[in-house]
Amino acid sequence: MTSLLLAVIYLAFIGLGLPDSLLGAAWPAMHEDLRVPLSYAGILSMIIALGTVVSSLQSDRLTLRLGTGRVTAISVGMTAAALLGFSFSGSFWQLCLWAVPYGLGAGSVDAALNNYVALHYKSRHMSWLHCMWGIGATTGPYIMGLALARGAGWSAGYSTIAGLQVLLTLLLLLSLPLWKSRPGARETAPASASAREQRKPLSLAAVLGIPGAREIIIAFFCYCALEQTCGLWASSFLHLGHGMTEERAAGLAALFFLGVTAGRAASGSSARPAGAPDHDALPSRAILRLCKDLGGRLVTVGSDAHQPRYLTDHIQDACAILRDEPGFSAIATFSRLTPTLHAL
């Protein structure tokens, strides 16, 4: 079940990437059909980005109330509706209206799934997850280019991606039981009122207070600036600056996202050195063996829990490591500095 759920999450991130590069790929044709300046793509992009930021900031609250599975299904469904709205739009102001749910749908699912994978899966899966986004972002311009090459127009490209998003929404709805059946699902199911009282969403000030958070935000801002610039304007540059056809420009613009995908795939492959254990302890297994060899006898276990509900996470795994690797026969608990041994 765990592997099946991971496959669903990967598909969800492919779906998240599909619409992200569509606007740039389609804009050389769109701005001519709508008779608006080329620069108006920046307006649509900013509306989508603003919606993404707003929904990302609310993602923790929504996930706590609804659970990751429901948030993902609702967000993808909202994106599907927005893409369908784009395909029917005949004026720029209609695109601006549909850009609002377009952005709102992207932000929550992005933050919710990143958080879920970080909590429940090995570190390399985070890189693979974003590699799946790259596959979607690479595929989107090719689908748009194919629609343009066949003379169906940019609206057909948007409706095709909308149809894929609808299918993904149905798959996510069918997969909702998986989010509850996997080990540790209590962390992603809708929280009770008492749980929500205990575990309040972090405020923006609290997030900025986390060591390293500001530096990560600045680095991510710089990355997004590069990604958005290339994704939004590459097709227009190739079409207007180099005289390429709209469909060829859309296809070649996808090469940027193909490069991003390759980099993330390489990162996922190297996230864990060959031969290294899937999960290591702190202190490491090597330190624990050295402690045992030097005569150490008193060891205890704990979890680096930042929230009350995580206090007992992986305690049994830690006990198994102590028993099977260095060969400790007991763990100690302490009361008033006095140890009590418990057999493993």
Image (tube, grey):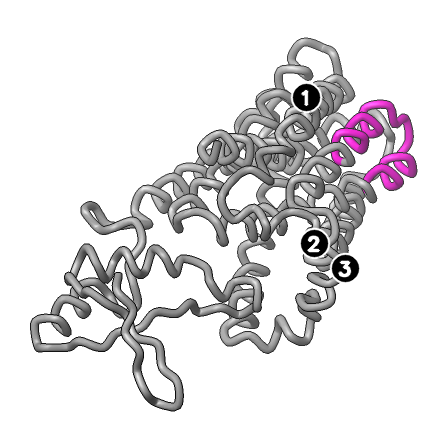
Image height of 212 relative to 86, above or below: below
Q: Which residue of the protein is positioned furthest toward the top in this rendering?
A: 150
Instruction: Tell me, yes or no, if residue 344 can be seen here.
Output: yes
Residue at figure coordinates x 75%, y 17% from the top left:
156
Image height of 319 relative to 30, above or below: below
Q: Which residue is mark 1?
A: 167
Residue 46 is labelled as none
Sequence-wise, the earlier of marks 3 and 1 is: 1
Instruction: Tell me, yes or no, if residue 253 can be seen here.
Output: no
Q: Which mark's residue is nearer the viewer, 3 or 1? A: 3
Q: Amino acid at mark 3?
A: Ala
What are the residue bounds of the magenta stretch? 79-99
Residues at marks 2 and 1, CA–CA distance in whole angstroms: 28 Å
Marks 3 and 2 in Cβ contact (< 8 Å): no
Q: Which mark's residue is nearer the viewer, 2 or 1? A: 2
Q: Answer with the quarter of the image where residue 304 lies.
A: bottom left
**Camera-side residue of 122 and 258:** 122
Q: Percent x, y for residue 191? A: 70, 54
Q: Secondary structure at mark 2?
A: loop
User: In the rendered structure, does residue 269 fall within the stretch colored magenta?
Assistant: no
Q: Which residue is mark 3?
A: 193
Count residues near mark 3 (Cα–Cα under 10 Å), then give few for <14, some for 14-19, many for 20+: few
Q: Percent x, y for residue 254? A: 54, 31
Q: Which residue is mark 2?
A: 191
Sequence-wise, the earlier of marks 2 and 1 is: 1
Q: Main secondary structure of the magenta part?
A: helix
Q: Secondary structure at mark 1?
A: helix
Residue at figure coordinates x 55%, y 49% from the top left:
116
Q: Percent x, y for residue 316? A: 36, 57
Residue 271 falls left or right of residue 32: left
Q: Amino acid at mark 2?
A: Ala
